[in-house]
């Protein structure tokens, strides 16, 4: 129940991108997208948190955080996906976000289409 409330609060705050940042940052530094509170980070070879419980009718947002290095020395961004077998999934992408809503209670497992066999998997538990 608490989780659902947090998700709703985050949803109402999202939408104002804004890069902010200091003047000394390289122009294209920071293509990582830190997840919002209650979201899931897509990092290299793991989803964090790997398990999450939400209320039916709410959604989950994943944010890609798979870039390392910086614009001066070269940045490497690794492609990952949020793949649900049999339902809507993200593209294979190296930055950005993906959001999916869950209407029906149940347990939903997902994996990265590239690194799933390395244990890059996650579970969303949807409660009534
Ligand atoms: Cu991956």
Image (cartoon, rainbow, N blue to C red):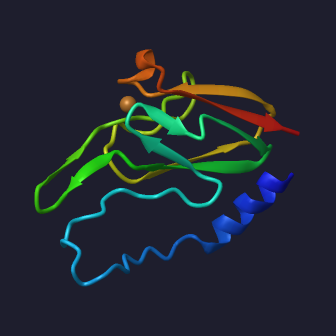
Q: Is residue 73 left or right of residue 32?
A: left
Say left or right for 18 vs 51.
left
The residue shown at (62%, 60%) is: 37
Looking at this rendering, what residue extends furthest in the bottom direction? Answer: 23
**Going by the image, does 83 lie left or right of 57?**
left
- Choose between 64 and 45: the one closer to the eye: 45
- Kindly identify the residue that appears in the image at 67 percent across and 27 percent down: 108
Where's residue 80, x and y in %?
Answer: 37, 35
Quadrant showing the C terminus: top right
Residue, x 79% and y 54% (percent of image)? 4
Q: Which of the four quarters of the rendered structure image does ligand 1 lie in?
A: top left
Position of 127 relative to 113 (above/below): below
Q: Is 82 placed left or right of 125 in the picture?
A: left
- Residue extending farthest to the top is 117
Residue 74 placed where, x, y %? 12, 53
Residue appearing at x 44%, y 28% in the figure:
112
Task: Name which quarter of the figure residue 52 lies in.
Answer: top right
């Amino acid at each position: 129940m608490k989780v659902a409330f947090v998700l709703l609060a985050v949803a109402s705050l999202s939408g104002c991108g804004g890069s902010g940042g200091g003047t000394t940052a390289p122009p294209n530094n920071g293509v990582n997208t830190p997840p919002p509170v209650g979201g899931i980070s897509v990092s290299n070879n793991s989803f964090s948190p790997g398990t999450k419980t939400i209320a039916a009718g709410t959604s989950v947002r994943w944010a890609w955080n798979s870039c390392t290095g910086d614009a001066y020395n070269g940045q490497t961004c690794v492609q990952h996906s949020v793949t649900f077998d049999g339902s809507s999934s993200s593209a294979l992408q190296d930055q950005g976000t993906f959001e999916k809503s869950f209407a029906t209670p149940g347990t939903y497992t997902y994996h990265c289409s590239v690194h799933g066999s390395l244990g890059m998997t996650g579970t969303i538990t949807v409660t009534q």
